[in-house]
Image: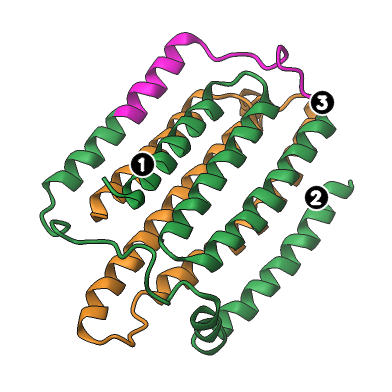
Amino acid sequence: MNTLEILFFALSALAIVSAVMVLISKNPIHSVLWLILVFFAISGHYILLNAQFLAIVNIIVYAGAIMVLFLFVMMLMNVKKDKEPQKQLLVKLVGVIAGGSFLTLLIALVKQNTSFNGREVLMKEGSIGLIHPLGQALFTDYVVPFEISSVLFLSAMVGAVIIGKK
Amino acid sequence: MPIEYYIFLCLTLFSIGVIGVLTRRNAIIVFMCVELMLNAVNLLLVAFSKMNYAAAQAMSPTTTAGIDAQVFVFFIMVVAAAEVSIGLAIIVMIYRNTHSIDINFLNRLKN
């Protein structure tokens, strides 16, 4: 087992354990902190795939901006952990069974599909994840969607202010 | 690294998100589980882009095949950021009106 595989499995275990902890921790603040750990593990996966730009953007946008917004809203509301009513045990059990059978179905489908056999993912090499090729693609082929997304941001900003004001 | 490993990892993360949406009642936790599902899909897109790049690089070394997927992931992150700002504003409004973020309170919307 080489270093790459050890890193892959360690990051995967970290991501899955943290994702489970998001679900089972009672305090919502702890859930947010575990979710930040999931995002850091996914950024580590991006670095392993040599998608450096996306790794940095994932940390800045998700762990930096979005999760801070979540923490801010949660502290603003001051939600007590004992105030959150728990769902009945039956509903929880049905939810876990439904999600588990969904996972089993998808894994069975992937295992049955032969078109993925022997397809390798290129790790730690390849230049398409660097800033220069991505920037060139973004500002030549994808310049119209880029500008439209700025309009989307403007409308989201105005919408958030209007919703929050009254 | 075989592509199946990435597919299984992302399916597991996605299913954990689905279970969270189905079992939790706190609206913010449900929202966070949606973010978790989005991130699982992003990771799978990047893995598939590197898989296609590896196949195309064998033909020509200077190819940029697979770069579209990474631009796509960038746009998914942009839309997710906009979605979170609106969604959290809506949750704050719900809390201000009902003093609770229990999603079961929202069944009064049907009246």
Q: Chain of mark 1?
A: A
Observer-nearest of A32 and A5: A5
Q: In the image, what residue occupies the spot 62% across and 18% down?
A: A26
Range of residues picked out in magenta: A78-100
For marks 2 and 1, the one nearer the N-term is 1
Q: Amino acid at mark 3?
A: Asn
Q: Viewer-nearest of labels 3 and 2?
A: 3
For marks 1 and 3, the one nearer the N-term is 1
- The residue pinned by badge 3 equals A78
How much space separates mark 1 and mark 3, taking CA atoms? 37 Å
How much space separates mark 3 and mark 2, taking CA atoms? 20 Å
For residue A163, which numbered disc appears in the image?
A: 2
The question of residue A90 being in magenta is answered with yes
Q: Amino acid at mark 2?
A: Ile
Tell me the shade of chain B.
orange
Q: Amino acid at mark 1?
A: Phe
- The residue pinned by badge 1 equals A9
- Horizontal and vertical percent position of residue A67: 68, 44
Image coloring type: by chain
Q: Chain of mark 2?
A: A
What is the secondary structure assignment of the residue under circle 3? loop
Q: In the image, what residue occupies the spot 75% across and 68% down?
A: A154
Q: Quadrant of the C terminus of chain B?
A: top right
For residue A56, which numbered disc appears in the image?
A: none
- Mark 3 packing: few (<14 Cα in 10 Å), some, or many (20+)? few
